[in-house]
Image: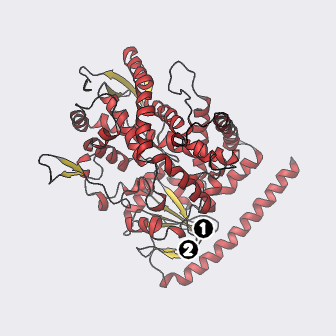
Amino acid sequence: MEETLAFLLLTVSTFLCSFIIKFLMVSLLSKSSKSSSHPTYGPKCYPIIGSALSFYANIHRLPEYNTEILRESPTHTVVLIRPIGGSKTVMTANPDNVEHILKTKFHAYPKGPTTHFLLYDLLGNGIFNADGETWKVQRKISSHEFNTRSLRKFVNTAVNSEISSRLLPLLHSAAAGKTTLDLQDVLQRFAFDNICKVAFGSDPGCLDPALPPSEFTSAFNLAVSITSDRFKTLFPVVWMIKRALGVGPERKLRDAIRVVDEYARNLIRERRSQPISSTEDLDLLSRFMSTGNVDEDFLRDIVISFLLAGMDTTSAALTWFFWLLSENERVEEKILKEIANVKEGVGFDEAKDLVYLHAALCEAMRLYPPVPIDSKHAAEDDVLPDGTVVEKGARVIYHPYGMGRMESLWGKDWSEFRPERWLQRDENVEGKIKFVPEDPYKYPVFQAGPRVCLGKEMAFIQMKSIVISVLCRFTVVPAVADFQPVFELSLTSKMKGGFPVRIEERKECAIAEE
């Protein structure tokens, strides 16, 4: 043990010395070219420690802090310097820059080695952590799962059955017993059941109140939280040492991933043991299996990646949506009016016609995007449209959370929850309003360009189905008076400590009878 510690100390010392030398060299080069370079904006930078002071002073409120410094920059772009010679980080809320990164020069901004390394223990080489051919193959196979036929099947067999058999009974029971529920947890468990049904042909019954809490979801949430914290560490060598020694959060992460791995591999083995009767009805996992000799490690990465997407994104969006509704009675009344004549079990076509509800969901995700930030790796030297110089190897971040809070993008009323900003009168039909989508690079909630979210339509259908079924029967009331949630920065947007609510039966049900 002593020899191991001595080796680690020597490694760290060598690592720090090399970084100091690198930092001094970068500083000298930057000073020599400063007069000819485009001006950059960001927090004050100091020798050796870079932008660390401002970072650590605001580490408890990074999304809000990032938004503030982006707002102060005339270009809505800032440059941060990591300590001890670390590479620069370019962060932007400029739509022109976002389009440049996500589409125009897509090839120059992959996920990159840093993000891949940080997420590898959890996501491996899954679609959300892959580049190049590995990503292309997964993207192509996955796209078959999100066609119109699959979406209709998703609504009919997964969403509506889960709502009627599990979600509504759970809410009725809570209303009758006047018990408090953590709505964030309930929505996540609902989404977990859904993604397992449609993507893996499995029904874990996680939302069933008769079953004990899922060991998997607890382990998965812990793994996501600790993995997210790696991104906040200015000195990556710290968490790497903890991982090597198996101590602290990294020990907990290792144990949590062991549970996650076991669940994923059991699911894969179970699916492999079942004969495939028709190639037309393949679920996502079966599609990957049918491509040939695909090893279990690769399939494990596929399963975990889609569980992350299916569990955390829609549940995060709906958690914030229901809280915003509790604060905006006017919006809730308008939604109730729109859905008053919707029949039980909303279908694919009916969901598309609910324009005010669609606008309200988009507005909620403007303020609380399910994925608050996303980072890329500069594979080559580049210059962004606003003139910001990007050096090869830099980390490049676009910031959906901050973009939704820019007055220059959304007007002086940017802080208001106002679905009407997405609507306008339909000139072809008297008295009708229509939804008007925003530029995806101004509103990159679902990414954009070649990596645009495949599950966008599926997410909207799931969210609309849940909202209609819940609002027509219940009022969702925060269990704490004047409840003000704390935004927790993770791989997805979370409410710190969950969203405790009381469920109250509505006096009149707005669902139309068959």
Q: Name the kind of residue labelled 1 in the image.
A: Ser
Residue 122 seen in the current view: no
Q: What residue type is labelled 2?
A: Glu
Q: What element carries label 2?
A: loop
Q: Is mark 1 on a helix, strand or loop?
A: loop
Position in image of residue 303 (x %, y %): 60, 43
- Answer yes or no: do the residues labelled 1 and 2 have beta carbons within 8 Å? yes
Task: Work out whether residue 154 or residue 331 is closer to the camera in this orientation and state it.
Answer: 154
Q: Which residue is drawn at 29% across and 53% down?
A: 414
Q: In this view, does 432 lie to the left or right of 133?
A: left
| Looking at the image, residue 351 lies above or below residue 13 | above
Residue 320 placement (x, y as % from top left):
39, 40
Q: Relative to 241, is 4 on the left or the right? A: right
Q: Residue furthest left?
A: 430
Label placed on residue 87: 1
Q: Is residue 288 left or right of residue 322?
A: right
User: Badge 2 is on which residue?
Assistant: 391
- The percent position of residue 406, horizontal first and vertical second, equals 34, 58
